[in-house]
């Protein structure tokens, strides 16, 4: 190893540390300033629920009516029913945020992961929930009745705030 | 004692002199040995110990980094978010400060600590992602890691950090393709994309050789580019890949095909710049031109899908693979680059074993297949190693006679 110029080396070190802090700061800002919605999960194959220290989540809104191609970015306007949010008025997806925002105040940005005929699987970036080591089994036991509190920013990006277990 | 920057520069220069025929292999070794960079007569033991201490230092750095991250991860719930960030930033800073302190007296340990710092930076990115439940497989985290590792590689002349950066970039692109569904369906497009990365990286390595500050990274970049290209070629050599090509490409969104086309355009532009920059020198034409020919031939097989059955596809793609083995070995001999000879022979061995299983699996009892495979590996491995030594010796003789 040879350091070209110490100043350049320390600038890169500073940039790495600031980068991590900025990443955390940006996520914290999005979490605090976004609109809160509660989404319902649906049961999935229990063998796939808990892998290591995180839970795989699948939502009621993970499968929607749409004809977009696999890999396409779509915007899903949400509608509140009781204390949970679900897919809004038809059509359930739009290709632009503006189009979707005309139909609802809360819009989720997602990516089509499977396109099959009239329905698509959409991933919103909130499909993993990290849990303390060894607590995944407890979550498996109550699987199927989970709700997730999510924060949605002004561009439709979603972040998980917390997992709502039935007795909490 | 000459400083590390001079030694690193000298090593790269001597490698370039050797390739350009200014010095022969023996002279190159004596120059390097004078500055403790290569074993001279009677110095091989010291050099071996140096390499061993480097390996041990790198393993130690990896273990320290892993331990720190595991400690943070297992106590994650007891720490609040600010404390977690303080621990991550502190671990990162500690690795780099230790590296700076050890730089003059223990350069190998300092290099290992830079690698540990690069690893801790990557782990920090993923731990912050975990803190905010960023989904598993999010591509931007890999890109973030690469964006931190690449400047550190150049700032500290750290080849291992460059390898981490390249691996992160290649993983990022793979995850982007996974999000678009490219791994589930038309694997052919994935192969085409990685061929562009392979050719582009070899071109970048040749450009790196022409500038003194980037010269120390040329070998690592070239090795990664060559390895990616040959790995793709090996995967495509299976007859099953015929089914993944052709019409299935249309199910992907346009931006995926556009990104692959842009990658190939970039790789071709880099190749053209290299050829022009080196005055169309024979080694550059043989290296870049040869790789581009391989890539174009494979792209044609995947994108044009010219055969109606897998058998002719398998025949042609294996002929391309055989030609590539020949190209790599001949190029290695004529330019004195041992890595090309080694890469060509590794591809040859892998192809022989794969084709053996293709044919023998359906024809013979499985126990016989495995006994045959064992004998093939034992006999073939010995024969390959003997051929490799003869070819490398010949490469050195060619180099000496060229100079003489």
Image (cartoon, rainbow, N blue to C red):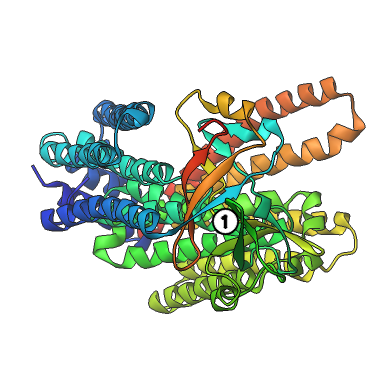
- Front-most of residues A142 and A10: A142
Residue at 72 percent across and 70 percent down: it is A90
Q: How many marks?
A: 1
- Res B74 quadrant in image: top left
**Looking at the picture, does residue B196 appear above or below residue B134?**
below
Q: Outermost residue, left direction?
A: B1
**How dense is the environment of label 1, judged by Cα within 10 Å: few (below 14), some, or many (20 and up)?**
many
Indicate left or right for B373 with B395 as reference. right
Q: Is residue B203 above or below residue B94?
A: below
Residue A70 rendering spot, x and y as whole percentages? 69, 63
Q: Give the residue displayed 78% in from the left and 57% down from the top.
A: B244
Q: On the picture, is A18 further left or further right than B228? A: left
Identified at 30% across, 50% down, the residue is: A20
- Residue placed most toward the observer, B331 or A75: A75
| Residue B271: image location, x then y, percent | 49, 72
Quadrant of residue B87 in the image? top left
Using the image as rendered, state which of residue A164 and residue A26 is in the foreground: A164
User: Seen from this angle, which residue lies furthest front?
Assistant: A82
Image position, residue B366 (x, y; %): 84, 24
Q: In the visual, does B220 lie left or right of A148?
A: left
Mark 1, residue position? A124
Up the image or down, B327 lies above or below B118; here it is below
Whether residue B398 appears in this view of the structure is no
Looking at the rendered image, the quarter that the N terminus of chain A falls into is top left
Q: Chain of mark 1?
A: A
Front residue of this view, candidates B98 and B12: B98
The answer to whether any part of residue A145 appears in the image is yes
Secondary structure, mark 1, is loop
Which residue is depicted at the point 73% across and 67% down?
Answer: A66
Percent x, y of residue B320: 71, 59
């Amino acid at each position: 190893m040879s350091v070209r110029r110490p100043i350049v080396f320390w600038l890169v070190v500073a940039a790495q540390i600031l980068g991590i802090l900025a990443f955390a700061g940006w996520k914290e800002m999005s979490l605090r300033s976004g609109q809160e919605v509660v989404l319902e999960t649906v049961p999935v194959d229990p063998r796939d629920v808990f892998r290591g220290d995180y839970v795989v989540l699948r939502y009621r809104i993970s499968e929607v009516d749409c004809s977009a191609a696999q890999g396409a970015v779509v915007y899903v306007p949400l509608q509140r029913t009781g204390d949970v949010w679900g897919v809004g008025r038809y059509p359930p997806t739009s290709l632009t945020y503006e189009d979707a925002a005309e139909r609802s105040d809360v819009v989720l940005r997602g990516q089509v992961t499977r396109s099959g005929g009239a329905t698509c699987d959409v991933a919103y970036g909130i499909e993993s929930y990290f849990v303390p080591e060894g607590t995944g089994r407890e979550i498996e036991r109550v699987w199927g009745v989970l709700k997730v509190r999510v924060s949605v920013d002004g561009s439709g990006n979603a972040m998980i705030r917390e997992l709502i277990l039935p007795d909490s | 004692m000459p400083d590390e920057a001079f030694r690193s520069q000298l090593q790269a220069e001597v490698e370039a002199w050797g390739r350009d025929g200014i010095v022969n292999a023996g002279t190159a070794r004596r120059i390097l040995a004078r500055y403790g960079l290569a074993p001279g007569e009677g110095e091989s033991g010291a050099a071996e110990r140096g390499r061993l201490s480097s390996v041990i230092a790198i393993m130690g750095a990896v273990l320290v980094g892993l331990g720190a991250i595991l400690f943070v991860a297992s106590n994650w719930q007891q720490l609040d978010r600010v404390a977690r960030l303080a621990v991550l930033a502190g671990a990162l800073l500690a690795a780099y400060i230790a590296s700076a302190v050890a730089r003059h007296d223990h350069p190998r340990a300092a290099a290992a600590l830079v690698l540990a710092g690069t690893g801790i930076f990557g782990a920090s990115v993923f731990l912050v992602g975990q803190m905010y439940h960023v989904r598993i497989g999010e591509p931007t985290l890999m890109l973030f890691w690469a964006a931190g590792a690449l400047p550190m590689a150049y700032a500290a002349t750290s080849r291992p950090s460059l390898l981490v950066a390249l691996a992160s970039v290649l993983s990022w692109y793979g995850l982007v393709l996974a999000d678009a569904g490219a791994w589930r369906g038309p694997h052919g497009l994935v192969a085409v994309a990685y061929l562009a990365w392979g050719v582009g990286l070899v071109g970048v390595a040749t450009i790196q050789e022409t500038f003194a500050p980037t010269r120390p990274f040329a070998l690592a970049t070239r090795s990664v580019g060559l390895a990616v290209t040959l790995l793709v070629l090996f995967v495509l050599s299976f007859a099953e890949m015929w089914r993944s090509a052709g019409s299935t490409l249309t199910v992907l969104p346009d931006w995926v095909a556009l990104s692959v086309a842009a990658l190939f355009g970039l790789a071709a532009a880099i190749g053209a710049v290299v050829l022009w920059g080196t005055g169309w020198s024979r080694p550059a034409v043989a290296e870049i031109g040869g790789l581009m020919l391989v890539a174009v031939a494979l792209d044609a097989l995947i994108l044009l899908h010219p055969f109606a059955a897998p058998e002719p596809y398998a025949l042609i793609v294996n002929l391309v693979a055989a030609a590539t083995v020949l190209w790599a070995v001949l190029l290695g001999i004529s330019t004195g680059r041992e890595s090309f000879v080694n890469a060509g022979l590794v591809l040859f061995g892998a192809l022989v074993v794969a084709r053996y299983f293709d044919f023998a699996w359906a024809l013979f009892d499985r126990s016989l297949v495995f006994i045959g495979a064992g004998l093939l590996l034992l006999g073939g491995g010995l024969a390959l190693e003997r051929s490799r030594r003869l070819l490398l010796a010949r490469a050195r003789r060619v180099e000496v006679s060229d100079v003489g």
